[in-house]
Image (cartoon, rainbow, N blue to C red):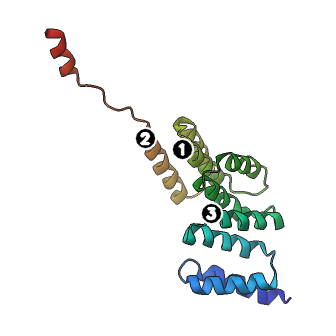
């Protein structure tokens, strides 16, 4: 297989996603027919399955296959973990998060971010905020840091206790 031809199909699929799904699928199918274990094509197929079709089981298969072919493929980890969270596979997500922290060169901020999202889904809000603050430490651009700040704010709003009965009602009861 001519590597340039394979790369052209993968690059065309990358360029088309998510704006031209028909072209994305066509180029991914060509790329995977030439090399069935191309990590980037498998990753993009996983994203397509999860984000466009909502088929988390298929997406998990594609992501797992991409990682099996290239364990240091950093882009896969945060997307794969998100799919596991969306699919409510929380234990599997935590195991992948733990492993992801051992991968050299991985964007640790994005992994801490999905760790926070996992804790939020488990309603462990204090742990979620702690993970988001850790993600912020690894943020190296304003867009990411602003996103993390909005996540922290959103989770803090969930933590606010419900208002108790007003004091005036309690005083009226005491006067009687």
Query: Which residue position holds label 2?
Result: 158
Which label lies toward us, 1 or 3?
Answer: 3
Mark 3 to mark 2: distance in Å?
27 Å
Q: Is residue 117 above or below residue 166?
A: below
Q: Nearer the viewer, residue 7 or 105?
A: 7
Q: Give the spatial CA distance, label 2 vs label 1.
A: 10 Å
Q: Nearer the viewer, residue 137 or 104?
A: 104
What's the residue at 62%, 47% (across, down)? 115
Question: Which numbered marker is on residue 170?
Answer: none
Comparing labels 3 and 2, the label whose residue is closer to the camera: 3
Residue 25 percent location from the top left of the image: 64, 82
Classify mark 1: residues with Cα within 10 Å, few (<14), some (14-19) or many (20+).
some
Q: Mark 1 or mark 2, which is nearer the start of the sequence?
A: 1
Vertical order, 28 against 159 (above or below):
below
**Judging from the image, what secondary structure is the residue with disc 3 in?**
helix
Query: x and y percent of residue 96 in the render?
Result: 73, 51
Q: Nearer the viewer, residue 127 or 66?
A: 66
Q: Residue furthest right?
A: 1
Please name the residue shown 78% across and 84% down the image: 33
Q: Are marks 2 and 1 in contact (CB under 8 Å)?
A: yes
Instruction: Judge by depth and name the residue closer to the eye, 157 or 150.
Output: 157
Q: Is 127 left, or right, of 58 in this rendering?
A: left
**Residue drawn where x is 66% and y is 55% of the image:** 81
- Tally of marks: 3
**Residue shown at 65%/58% (left/top)?**
78
Residue indicated by mark 1: 120
- Tell me if residue 95 comes above or below residue 140 in the rendering: above
- Of mark 1 and mark 3, the one earlier in the sequence is 3
Q: Quadrant of the C terminus?
A: top left
Q: Which residue is mark 3?
A: 56
Residue 95: x %, y % from top left: 73, 47
């Amino acid at each position: 297989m001519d590597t340039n031809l394979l790369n052209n199909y993968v690059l065309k699929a990358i360029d088309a996603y998510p704006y031209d799904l028909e072209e994305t699928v066509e180029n991914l199918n060509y790329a995977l027919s030439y090399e069935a274990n191309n990590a980037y094509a498998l990753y993009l197929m996983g994203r397509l399955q999860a984000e466009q079709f909502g088929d988390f089981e298929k997406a998990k298969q594609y992501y797992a296959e991409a990682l099996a072919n290239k364990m240091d493929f950093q882009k896969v980890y945060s997307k794969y973990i998100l799919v596991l969270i969306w699919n409510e596979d929380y234990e599997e997500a935590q195991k992948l998060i733990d492993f992801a922290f051992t991968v050299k060169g991985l964007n640790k901020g994005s992994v801490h971010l999905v760790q926070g999202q996992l804790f939020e889904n488990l309603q462990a809000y204090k742990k979620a905020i702690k993970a988001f603050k850790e993600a912020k430490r690894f943020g190296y651009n304003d867009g990411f840091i602003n996103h993390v700040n909005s996540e922290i704010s959103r989770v803090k709003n969930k933590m606010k206790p419900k208002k108790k009965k007003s004091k005036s009602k309690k005083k009226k009861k005491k006067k009687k």
